[in-house]
Image: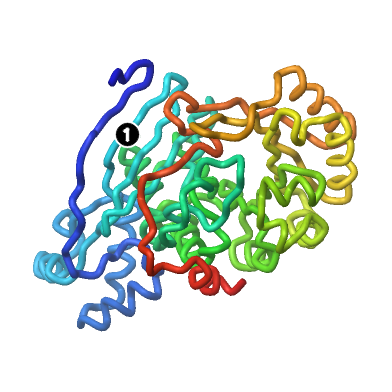
């Protein structure tokens, strides 16, 4: 099979990790201190270890030079610093990079970096597979396998930094990987606790040190959880809307049957940042003959005008067996003209990474769910 025009790198078959030592990656500061104390180590070591893991990006205790050798040896006996292993890295002709990551139990997940002139946005997954079955999304054809741990979530960003050689943590002005978008595989609000722990680690100014305004969490509309994004994280919110009527959205985003558009928009209107300088982003995939008419555009303006909002118009990214076609360029730009004329910003997203199936809605892995895993149990853990 030819690798052109894309580039496929670092092909590997990482083994499952049979090591029973606890993994420090993904623990909160408080959890790390408690774990060290449990094993008779001074809690103040947590700050040193935190700096080495998240600021310096190290994987081995032996290089932690400000910690005594005997303590380092003890840490090595007790713990590991284990982040996802790269099975494959693909590079698109447009500069996009996609990583297929092997987790400690052998499951796999995908992560993408989309470089721009002034920034690089790392698209991070929250689940293996997805709880939802959005009909336009390739990930939605893969049943949910399991939630990702906090370490597996933050580890995706760290793998991206490895690929770009961006350690130790750079200043804001020199970052190539400047933003995180929780828009990969899975629904983040069905795994909120682990997502929140991971993002707090990312935002910690003694570690990765990414500002909250550089982080966007995208949801398909898990209405009861939306307030927690504001109260516990205060990051940017994006909402996968994709339709202006419940009839159409029920087909595209089936969770709409549980929380229809009116309820979703009420939660968005009440979101604190919607009442200040930060706008909520509404994602709208352009599907030929489905949701792209002039009437749809005018209704979108009517629905979103009461909210401090912007719209990202996303040309549909095809995948094998997809039941939809992308709207024509003329239709997309006519739609954008109507929305912009209605007073909402509606940029058309330039598709990136299509040649390596790294574009929006194209991510998927081959992991399959254990028959014993029940989706409703995982949803219950999210409190919805």
For the residue pair 101 and 169, the one nearer the viewer reads as 101
User: Going 71% across and 63% down the picture, which residue do you hit?
Assistant: 258
Snapshot quadrant of residue 235 = bottom right
Coloration of the structure image: rainbow
Taking 332 as reference, is 267 above or below it?
below
Locate residue 180, reporting x and y percent.
51, 46
Instruction: From this view, report whether residue 193 is shown above or below residue 295.
Output: below
Q: Residues within 10 Å of mark 1 (few under 14, many from 20)?
A: many
Residue at (10% x, 66% y) in the render: 73
Q: How many marks?
A: 1
- The image quarter containing residue 152 is bottom left
Say which element carries label 1.
strand
Which percent across, then down, holds residue 213? 61, 49
Q: Give whichever of 32, 115 is nearer the camera.
A: 115
Quadrant of the drawing holding the C terminus: bottom right
Horizontally, residue 244 falls left or right of residue 318, namely right
In the image, is 101 to the left or to the right of 319? left
Query: In this rendering, would 99 be left or right of 179?
Result: left
Quarter holding the N terminus is top left
Instruction: Reply above or below: 366 against 71.
Output: above
Left or right side of 185 for 267 = right
Viewer-proximal residue, 82 or 323?
323
Q: Residue at x 55, y 37 (%)?
A: 360
Rendering coords of residue 245 (x, y %): 82, 47
Relative to the observer, which residue lies in front, 18 or 367? Answer: 367
**Residue wearing tag 1:** 89
Where does residue 287 sit, x and y in percent of width and height? 69, 32
Q: Is 251 rendered above or below residue 91?
A: below
At 27% from the left and 59% from the top, the residue drawn is 105
């Amino acid at each position: 099979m030819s690798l052109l025009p894309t580039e496929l790198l670092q092909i590997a078959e990482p083994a499952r990790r049979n090591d029973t030592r606890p993994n420090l990656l993904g623990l909160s500061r408080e959890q790390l201190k408690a774990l060290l104390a449990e094993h008779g180590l001074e809690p103040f070591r947590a700050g040193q270890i935190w700096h080495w893991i998240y600021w310096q990006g190290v994987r081995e205790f032996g290089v932690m030079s400000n910690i005594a050798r005997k303590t380092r040896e003890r840490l090595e006996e007790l713990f590991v610093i284990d982040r996802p292993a790269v099975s494959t890295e693909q590079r698109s002709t447009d500069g996009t990079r996609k990583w297929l990551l092997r987790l400690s139990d052998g499951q796999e997940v995908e992560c993408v970096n989309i470089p721009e002139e002034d920034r690089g946005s790392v698209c991070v997954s929250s689940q293996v597979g997805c709880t939802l079955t959005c009909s336009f999304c390739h990930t939605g054809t893969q049943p949910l396998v399991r939630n990702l741990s906090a370490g597996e979530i933050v580890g995706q960003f760290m793998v991206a930094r490895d690929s770009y050689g961006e350690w130790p943590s750079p200043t804001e002005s020199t970052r190539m990987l400047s933003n995180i978008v929780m828009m990969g595989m899975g629904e983040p609000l069905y795994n909120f606790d682990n997502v929140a722990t991971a993002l707090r680690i990312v935002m910690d100014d003694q570690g990765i040190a990414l500002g909250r305004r550089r982080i966007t969490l995208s949801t398909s509309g898990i209405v009861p959880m939306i307030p927690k994004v504001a109260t516990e994280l205060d990051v940017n919110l994006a909402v996968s809307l994709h339709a202006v009527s419940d009839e159409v959205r029920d087909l595209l985003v089936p969770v709409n049957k549980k929380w229809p558009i009116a309820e979703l928009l009420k939660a968005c209107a009440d979101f604190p940042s919607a009442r200040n300088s930060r706008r909520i982003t509404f994602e709208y995939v352009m599907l030929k003959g489905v949701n792209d008419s002039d009437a749809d555009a005018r209704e979108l303006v009517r629905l979103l005008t009461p909210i401090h909002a912007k719209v990202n118009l996303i040309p549909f990214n095809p995948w094998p067996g997809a039941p939809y076609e992308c709207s024509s360029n003329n239709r997309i730009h006519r739609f954008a003209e109507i929305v912009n004329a209605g007073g909402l910003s509606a940029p058309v997203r330039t598709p990136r990474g299509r040649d390596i199936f790294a574009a929006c809605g194209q991510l998927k892995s081959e992991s399959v769910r254990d028959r014993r895993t029940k989706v409703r149990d995982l949803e219950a853990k999210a409190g919805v």
